[in-house]
Amino acid sequence: MSRRKTERLLSLVVCLLSARRYLTATQIRAAVPGYPDSFDAFKRMFERDKDELRELGIPLETGTNAPGDEESGYRISRQAYELPDIRLEPDEVAVLGLAARVWRQAELAGAAEGALLKLRAAGIDAEDLTQPGIEPRVQTPEAAFGPLWEAVRDRRPVAFGYRGAGRSTTLRRNLEPWGVVNRRGRWYVVGQDTDRQAERVFRLSRIEGTVDFTGPAGSVTVPPGTDVRGAVRDWDSEASAPRSCLLRIRSGAGYGLRRHALREEPDEVPGWDRVELNYSDTGWWSEHVASFGADVVVIEPTDLRDAVIGRLKGVLA
Amino acid sequence: MTSPVKDGPVKASPVKDGPVKDGPVKASTATATERLQRLLALVPYVVSRNVVGMEDTAAAFGISERELVDDLNLLWCIELRSPDPYCPIDLSYEGGEIVVSEAEAIDRPLRLGVDEACALLIALRMLADLPSVGAGSALSRTIAKLELAAGAAAGPSAQVAVQVDDITAQAAAAEVAEALSGGRRLHIAYYVPGRDEATERDVDPMRLLLVEGHSYLEGWCRSAQDVRLFRLDRILAIEVLDVASEVPAGAAQVDVDHGLFRPSPTDVLVVFELAAAGRWVAEYWPTDQVEELADGRLRVQLRTPDTQWVRRLALRLGEDGRLVSPPELAEQVIADATAALSHYA
């Protein structure tokens, strides 16, 4: 009987919004049609209705009209309920439409749609007036995104299984999450690791199994001045100073390396060039150089040369 | 007490009280509250516009006109009984136009919820990082107005950030945006990492996409005579030509919402066995199958049209991953590594 329920909930909202005073449960029952005759059955249904209205974000308040009142009542303050007046210029409406499309198919798509619906209801015509052909999207394929967003939003601590890069085992981590950040298409969570008593960054795609809430809402405090973007950027970027290397690259090959060349000149061996490049992480750079196979040879430094030889021998192992 | 409007909904008897059976059916609970949300938006939608057409309204709410009529009838039937019975909502939908003459307390939309406010604000701030969107000050103005309207609900949005592509990619984005808005053809030099080649081609731009953290030019490639995606950070040089773009009418846009990689029947099926240090492969590329082996090892199966890319990936992985299938490709990888090592002999 979903229609009846909708009618009852709508009547309840209108009744509480129109009331200038707190209405007791008995007064509500008398005013709102659709509740059962038995008082106990009414109470149970009314409790569920209140929960559902609050879940929709309807600010249902509890209180008494006079200090001496024994029974508390309910009302919805119009000021707390209503979307404040908002007017947008045509170019602002256009970017809003573009913003709502960013989440299409991702975790917050429904929320973005809901927001747009309310703004339309406020008189804003959010049509697709955007500059043609620009389509930014955010994806949330990681199952952990939903619960971690909730945890950040509601300030709740969490626990999850995590497999660090290159680790063969999963460890249970306890985190007070401060924020979630998407960097170059991947989601990260930043927070205080309560076991290690230090700030940590975790990549959502390496979380295994479920994310569990380990404390009530409001129990996490984000330190003032926390820069969640900066934390992920620092974690992600190479801190070590750039080093220079000299490579021999076959003519007509190695574009992926030549693009970033500092210096390029023909080698004494015909059909080859000498290319100087900067890199920072020997491990990653040796993998990259090895991927060019027989088209690229490391001249120096020796540790890079050895690392590439090691990679290639690993293929044959 | 309102009186029935001419041609308006015929007033049914007020909802009969009595026990309502509301069993624990989850689906109907969801639809009841979803519909409530819609009704609470529908009234202010009409009120803020004075008069609206049925067709436009149904389209704005993504429902059929029949559902809309049902919604309007439901609103019109709402009756409160205390102290005296009265109908708080009065409306008519004569001649295909809706007018709400009495809306009592629900003439304004409900405030934005936390998820709603944050979804829009996170997306707007991400767009503000993209000069190619060309929205300029409209973004900062919209963000400010939305923050004001959302109030406390906007708070958690500061704890979520989406950082998009790097600056080098955005340089090409400005040119792509210029060609898109002017309807002009582009000439690009493009680096194809799988083949380690730089290629030159003319492209008629269709869209500028930002997907999975990277910007792409989607366009009709005049050499391939097909729709192609070009990652902006792999465009080595770009020039807006003084030629009008001509995208064929039948050129189909890539369905970005279901991933950029579309399997094709001509793809090669490859299998890697990865050590723990090579598990990142499964994070970076879409896989057909992933199977956990002992000691954190992983067996992954993926599809690709590009065997050259597979050979390069196998060389990059070294002992962190072994290509096990197809066997002839695995043999080729051994030959590649042997040839590369001969330079160090």
Image: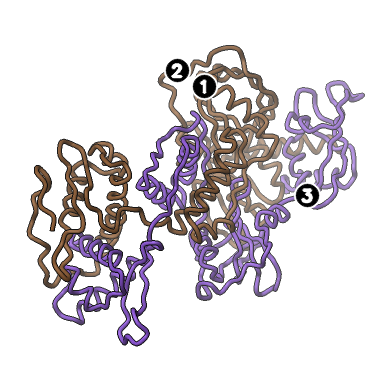
Closest to the camera, between mark 2 and mark 3, is 2
Res B46 → quadrant? top left
Question: Mark 2 packing: few (<14 Cα in 10 Å), some, or many (20+)?
Answer: few
| Amino acid identity at mark 3 | Gly
Is residue A53 depicted above or below B112 in this figure? Answer: below
Residue A283's disc is 3
| Amino acid identity at mark 1 | Trp
Screen quadrant of the C terminus of chain B:
top right
Mark 3–mark 1 contact, CB under 8 Å? no
Give the chain coloured brown.
Answer: B
Given residues B124 and B334, the one toward you in this image is B124
- Please indicate whether residue B153 sits to the left or right of residue A180 in the image: left
Give the chain coloured purple.
Answer: A
- Please indicate whether residue A56 sits to the left or right of residue A246 in the image: left
Picture residue at 20% right of the left edge, 78% below the top: A41
Screen quadrant of the N terminus of chain B:
bottom left
C-alpha span from label 2 to label 3: 46 Å
Q: Secondary structure at mark 3?
A: helix
Question: Mark 1 packing: few (<14 Cα in 10 Å), some, or many (20+)?
Answer: many
Residue A76 in picture, x, y percent from top left: 34, 67
- Please indicate whether residue A267 sits to the left or right of residue B91 in the image: right
Residue B300 in picture, x, y percent from top left: 55, 49
Residue B2 in picture, x, y percent from top left: 13, 55
Work out whether residue B301 can be spotted. Answer: no
Q: Which residue is mark 2?
A: B248
